[in-house]
């Protein structure tokens, strides 16, 4: 399956790259200028791509099940990266994931550690909290009232399918006890986990569990919601830069 992607800050040297993994309803455009700003700060090229069902990538072809994030991390992402690694001579990858993308980054790094230099997550989930489920209903209400029509700019005629694929699986009884803490214990690369203090989809327990199971460095950003990279862009870039410097990069 051919997935849509683009390079940012590309140079002739692509041995080390930053790979951006978007949120549950995300796309390349919804990152805004964060990938380019971060890559310029790190002086590295980056790759931003859209998972199946998102943006200009192919539409979803089946109903999501409780293992959908594992499938994105362990099936789709390796298939996407394999030709890029071989043609671009990529030797090291820095994973930067937001929300679902952060979860996928953790799962991928746990199973495919060979080229992972570092992992940065923002608003990642490792368990399904009651706060997460509660946060979805207002989004559904907003969608039904037309307040989220802007998503169609990015996802076109895939928007409704994608929206309910996200909203329905997180509220599905089969997903109630979803928990990846055991899956990520094998991560050996350094991890920086960031979350906003006012994140409507998760509590500080997400950070605590990531730290407990990966020895991550964690940061809770005050007066910040679910999108730290957009709400507190400069803060996130500084945190990531310092994190990479402290880990020898």
Image (cartoon, rainbow, N blue to C red):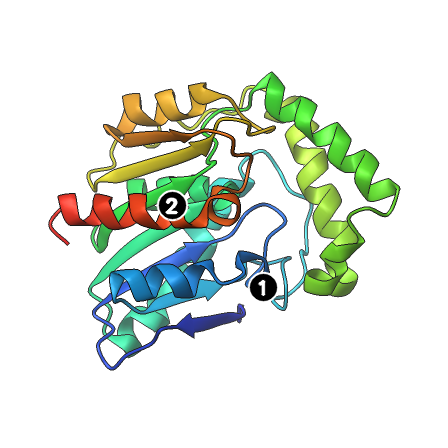
Q: Position of residue 214 (x, y in %)?
A: 26, 29
Q: What residue is shown at x 72% (from left), y 55% (from top)?
A: 151
* Residue 156, placed above or below residue 195: below
Q: Residue furthest left?
A: 248
Q: Position of residue 231 (x, y in %)?
A: 52, 44
Q: Earlier in the sequence, mark 1 or mark 2?
A: 1
Of 200 and 81, the residue lying toward us? 200
Q: Label 2: state its secondary structure.
A: helix
Mark 1 or 2, closer to the camera:
2
* Residue 219, placed above or below residue 177: below
> Could you give the CA–CA distance between mark 1 and mark 2, rounded to whole angstroms?
19 Å
Which residue carries the number 1 mark?
A: 29
Residue 65's disc is none
Q: Position of residue 20 (x, y in %)?
A: 42, 57
Q: Position of residue 194 (x, y in %)?
A: 39, 36
Q: What residue is shown at x 59% (from left), y 58% (from top)?
A: 30
């Amino acid at each position: 399956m051919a997935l849509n992607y683009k390079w940012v800050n590309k140079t002739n040297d692509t041995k080390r790259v930053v790979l951006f993994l978007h949120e549950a309803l995300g796309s390349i455009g919804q990152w805004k200028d964060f990938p380019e700003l971060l890559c310029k700060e790190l002086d590295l090229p980056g790759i931003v791509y859209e998972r199946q069902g998102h943006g200009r990538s192919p539409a979803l072809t089946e109903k999501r099940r409780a293992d959908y994030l594992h499938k994105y991390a362990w099936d789709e992402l390796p298939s996407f990266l394999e030709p890029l690694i071989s043609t671009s001579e990529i030797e090291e990858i820095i994973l930067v994931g937001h929300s679902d993308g952060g979860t996928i980054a953790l799962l991928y790094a746990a199973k495919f550690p060979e080229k992972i230099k570092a992992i940065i997550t923002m608003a990642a989930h490792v368990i399904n909290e009651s706060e997460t489920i509660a946060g979805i209903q207002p989004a559904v209400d907003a969608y039904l009232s037309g307040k989220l029509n802007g998503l169609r700019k990015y996802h076109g005629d895939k928007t409704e399918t994608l929206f309910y694929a996200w909203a329905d699986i997180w509220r599905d009884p089969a997903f109630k006890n979803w928990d990846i803490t055991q899956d990520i214990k094998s991560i050996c690369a350094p991890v920086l986990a960031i979350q906003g203090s006012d994140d409507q989809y998760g509590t500080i327990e997400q950070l605590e569990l990531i730290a407990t199971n990966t020895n991550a460095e964690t940061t809770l950003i005050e007066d910040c919601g679910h999108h730290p990279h957009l709400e507190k862009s400069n803060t996130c870039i500084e945190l990531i830069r310092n994190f990479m410097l402290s880990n020898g990069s």
